[in-house]
Amino acid sequence: MSRAPNPSPGPSPSVPAGASPGVPVVASPEALRFAAWLQWTTRIGLTVMVTSVAIYLLGWLPARVAPEQMAQLWSRPLAEYLQASGAPTGWGWLLDLSHGDMAGLAGIAILAGGAMPALLALIPVFRRLDQKIFVRLCIAEVLVLALAASGLFGGGH
């Protein structure tokens, strides 16, 4: 019995870019720490999102917009959606998590901000290794992410 040839040219998808088949890829302890933190924040964010959507759809929390009306409102321009739903703008959703349709935003925020705790977890490691440039880079990246999320530079509604 013969095997069909691989239709796609290039390396196997199981071999990372730049690696040679048969040669093990070794990640640094720092990369593994970052990946572990990112994995946990992703799991938490997805769990919060799935749970909050279920709570919304089951009607366990009051909603600003009933699930059966959501599709109609989504097709409207933002200003009309905000007026019809009464949804808060900017970071106002944090004060509105008691509504089922707003609770899902917590999971999205956890997913979006998941790199921040992972980067913060690297700072003590890089300090122990006396890698000052990496400490500064981690701090700078966390500050950039925090400033971007703040909406101070034009984001938001």
Image (cartoon, rainbow, N blue to C red):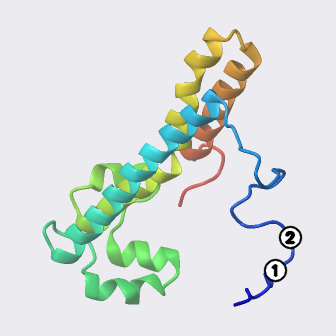
Q: Residues within 10 Å of mark 1 (few under 14, many from 20)?
A: few
Q: Is mark 2 in CB contact (under 8 Å) with mark 1?
A: yes
Point out which mark residue 65 bears: none
Look at 67% across and 11% down and name the residue there. Answer: 129
Please indicate whether residue 87 sits to the left or right of residue 157 in the image: left
Q: Look at label 2 and name its amino acid.
A: Gly
3D distance between C-alphas at marks 2 and 1: 7 Å
Q: Is residue 156 above or below residue 79?
A: above
Point out which mark residue 8 bears: 1
Q: Is residue 140 above or below residue 92?
A: above
* Residue at the spot of label 2: 10
Look at 69% across and 90% down and name the residue there. Answer: 1
Look at 78% across and 81% down and name the residue there. Answer: 6
Q: Is residue 80 above or below residue 94?
A: below
Q: Looking at the image, which is closer to me, 84 or 111?
A: 111
Q: Look at label 1 and name its amino acid.
A: Ser
Residue at far front of view: 1
